[in-house]
Image: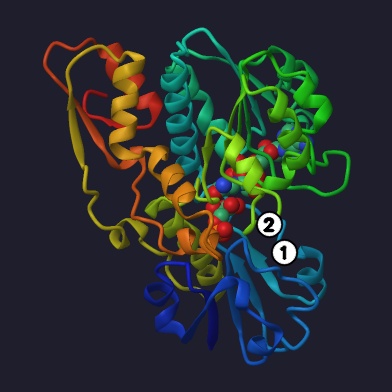
Amino acid sequence: MHILADENMPYVEALFGPHGKVTRVAGRDISADMLVDVDVLLVRSVTKVDSKLLAKANKLHFVGTATIGTDHVDEQLLAERGITFTNAPGCNAYAVCDYVLSSLLLVAERRQLRLKGLTMGVIGIGNIGKRLLPRLEALGLNVLVCDPPRAEAESSFESTALASLIAQSDIVTLHVPLLMTGRHKTHHLIGAAELAQLKPEAIIINACRGEVIDNQALKQHLATHSEHSVVLDVWENEPQPDPQLMALVDIATPHIAGYSQEGKAFGTSIVYDHWAALHGFAKADVQALLPTPELAAMTVAGKPTQGLLKQLVHAVYDVRNDDERMRAVSQQTGYFDRLRKSYPLRRELLSTQINMSAGMPADNATTLARLGFQCSDL
Ligand SMILES: NC(=O)C1=CN([C@@H]2O[C@H](COP(=O)(O)OP(=O)(O)OC[C@H]3O[C@@H](n4cnc5c(N)ncnc54)[C@H](O)[C@@H]3O)[C@@H](O)[C@H]2O)C=CC1
Ligand SMILES: O=C(O)C(=O)[C@H](O)COP(=O)(O)O
């Protein structure tokens, strides 16, 4: 069995290694010639899996992407050729929640904003969106949701219309797949018209796909609306984002919102479990693969004010470091992929246990647990 895997997927040797020969390649360099004798192809978001790539892949029976996003994969082609395909739903949902929380708390600090009582609109209530809701409520935000496909599928799900959500929200965050066509198309979901409807001083966060916001329209908008704060993890034309747009946004990161150790490990293990089930092998034990977190526990004394919550979140993950690293090297050729390849080890809030000091009200533990920490008092 020959398994070809993106070099940025951890634990492939540990999981797939016992079943065959593993070859590693940079995701953007995987080519048709490399797939001639390959049985299993394991990719991340940067490899376009299409008819050109699969032109000589006559032995290929399985393609797995260690991502939730599938916009880089021609799933219809794989089905037509009888090649089993899976993505990794939910693998990095907690990591993206941590990214959104850290960004929100950082922008609020810089702008001296009290988040409690503000309204936050979440667009896309899937693996990430649904986990984000209790976290935002723990910060005292009122939450509006927009997910028309879910509203169609579930009669009890109430979706606010996009225009109405934008007009009412102090903060808007995007968690939709990139869909180029169809009734629920998300390509340029946010364009000049939507930007014009934002509340004065609104904050907008995009950690889904760059193409969901029209980047040229955003650049033009920000040139005359510097009162808006923008957080971008994803960009049109990756790995070469527009430097002028980067200069205008408040937080800029190189598509790493999902890059926790857990997120990457689950990406590989979910794909492995799918493949293993086809062959009757046991599931992966991800917790056994993950090292002990550096910050396994923290003790908290005091009320969970916005300041304390920011301190706790940033003790585990502080987006400021990713923003600074990106801006420091953004003049260099190839910096975007280099930052992603050499990304520092990062754990999720869920990997840190909070111990409440004696006499703390139970409500405090509930707030911290809703934010995503493990809490000893619950
Ligand atoms: N920056 C990063 O590192 C990461 C980016 N992503 C991106 O975020 C996206 C969302 O991730 P998950 O929540 O895990 O995916 P998911 O597939 O679980 O959820 C997506 C949700 O968006 C909804 N949706 C689809 N079209 C919509 C529309 N037109 N308007 C509103 N809602 C719509 C779907 O009904 C679904 O509930 C992924 O597709 C991926 O592109 C995901 C993980 C990491
Ligand atoms: O899961 C997704 O979808 C993502 O966007 C990934 O976190 C992105 O990681 P790469 O596949 O680009 O390494």
The amino acid sitting under disc 1 is Val
Who's the residue at 45% across and 52% down the image? 259
Quarter of the rendering occupied by the C terminus: top left
| Amino acid tagged 2 | Thr
Answer yes or no: is residue 347 visible.
yes
Residue 311: name its quadrant: top left
The residue at the far right in this view is 182
Whole-percent x, y for residue 191 in the image: 80, 33
Q: Are marks 1 and 2 in contact (CB under 8 Å)?
A: yes
Q: Which mark is residue 73?
A: 1
Label 2, on which residue? 70
Relative to 233, is 265 on the left or the right? left
In this rendering, position of residue 159 left or right of residue 65: right
Decide if ligand 1 comes within 8 Å of the CB at mark 2: yes
Q: Give the residue at x 67% y 34%.
A: 124
Q: CA distance from mark 1 to mark 2?
A: 5 Å
- Say above or below: 249 vs 334: above
Question: What SS does tag 2 mark?
Answer: loop
